[in-house]
Image (tube, grey):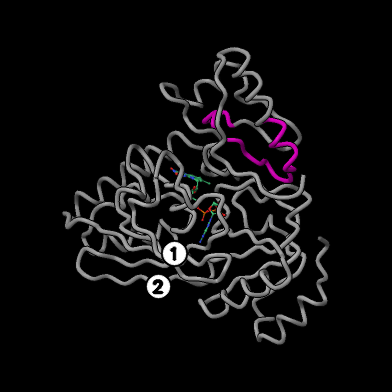
Amino acid sequence: MKMNKDIIKNECKKQGIDSIIKYDEPLKNHTSLRIGGPADVFCSPGNIEDLKKVVSISKKYNIPFWVIGNGTNLLILDNGIKGLVINLNKGFKKIEFSDKIVKVGAGVSLVYLSKIALNRELSGLEFACNIPGTLGGAIINNAGFKGNFVADVVQNVTFLTGENKIEKASKSNLNFNYRESNLKGKSVIILEATMLLKKGNKEEIESKIKENIKIRENKQPLRKLNAGSIFKNPPGYYAGELVEKVGAKGLSRGKAEVSLKHANFIINNGGALAGDILYLIEEIEKRVKKNFGIKLEREIEILGEP
Ligand SMILES: Cc1cc2nc3c(=O)[nH]c(=O)nc-3n(C[C@H](O)[C@H](O)[C@H](O)COP(=O)(O)OP(=O)(O)OC[C@H]3O[C@@H](n4cnc5c(N)ncnc54)[C@H](O)[C@@H]3O)c2cc1C
């Protein structure tokens, strides 16, 4: 269904939320790859009341919505997103500690959260020290590093459904798995999560953080535009090694290139199109399937109009 933007504009004005709405917003401004066409409607609600109004408009006019955090695990296609994009990284940033329990808003960045936990001598988030996403995205993907995952510390998650109802799920109901939770792909907006951390020793926490940062700086193309790992590691293999073995390291198309530093990263050398990145992804998939009989699973999520 084609959206009538004038109707949406009037409705947003009526509900007093026009200041948080943008139209035809280029999504490349909201992704770490700096790629992505426009969103018909883009909103950054700062609180639950405004968010509920947005969801009610989506419901009333039957407009599908997508949620994005920092856009660090996304390839948004060049034709953009037809519908509504809800971005939570402007609001939802509350952090409340009660001893070892911390309640965290979905828009909080993992990097910041890891720092705050260090200052309070709380351990459990050292792995998150340089994962560039928000907590919302990290829960959806069960983000992790070197054997530690968000699922290790999350106790429960509060989210808003497409029906505008606030619900809460405990960890045991979220089916966390490798880069998966059962909220992925559902029309829900994570609002906050409660985490249980451990009392730790500041020097030890800091040294773990420094070690994690060093590993990444040595191995990953952090100074280039990227969206983290493109593929999940298949059981018993490293995706990056498979990419190298099929001769795809350094492969390029337009301004997109399979990183020479880490073959499971594709970088945008400036001005790459989503189609260039997608071409490289599909080429790697074909080669790995042909040479090893392995079907690579994508870790990066592709959104938008083909
Ligand atoms: C340099 C670099 C290094 C990285 N290293 C790692 C790593 O070590 N480990 C790792 O796991 N990942 C890594 N990533 C990938 C990425 O940072 C994580 O997956 C991160 O958790 C995604 O968070 P985000 O806010 O950017 O989510 P986005 O990319 O914006 O979205 C990811 C998914 O989460 C959904 N989502 C986001 N927020 C919400 C919300 N509030 N409610 C409902 N759904 C939501 C989106 O709809 C989408 O499905 C890396 C990325 C980069 C660029």
- On whether residue 62 falls in the magenta region, the answer is no
On the image, the x and y values in percent for residue 146 come to: 35, 37
On screen, residue 90 versus residue 103, left or right, reads right
Circles 1 and 2, Cβ within 8 Å, touching? The answer is yes
The structure residue drawn at horizontal position 57% and vertical position 68%, both measured from the top left corner, is: 163
**Part of the protein shown in magenta:** 259-280
- Quadrant for the C terminus, please: top right
The structure residue drawn at horizontal position 61% and vertical position 18%, both measured from the top left corner, is: 289
Q: Secondary structure at mark 1?
A: loop
The structure residue drawn at horizontal position 44% and vertical position 66%, both measured from the top left corner, is: 167
Q: Nearer the viewer, residue 22 or 262?
A: 22
Q: Which residue is mark 2?
A: 94
Circle 1 Cα neighbour tier, 10 Å, few/some/many (<14 / 14–19 / ≥20): many
Amino acid identity at mark 1: Val
Establish if 101 lies above or below 300: below
Amino acid identity at mark 2: Lys
Picture disc at residue 108: 1
On the image, the x and y values in percent for residue 223 come to: 54, 44
Establish if 155 lies above or below 300: below
Label 1, label 2: how far apart the Cα atoms are: 7 Å
Q: Quadrant of residue 81?
A: bottom right
Q: Nearer the viewer, residue 293 or 288?
A: 293
Q: Is mark 2 within 8 Å of ligand 1?
A: no
Establish if 122 lies above or below 46: above
Circle 2 Cα neighbour tier, 10 Å, few/some/many (<14 / 14–19 / ≥20): few
Q: Nearer the viewer, residue 158 or 141?
A: 158
Picture disc at residue 44: none
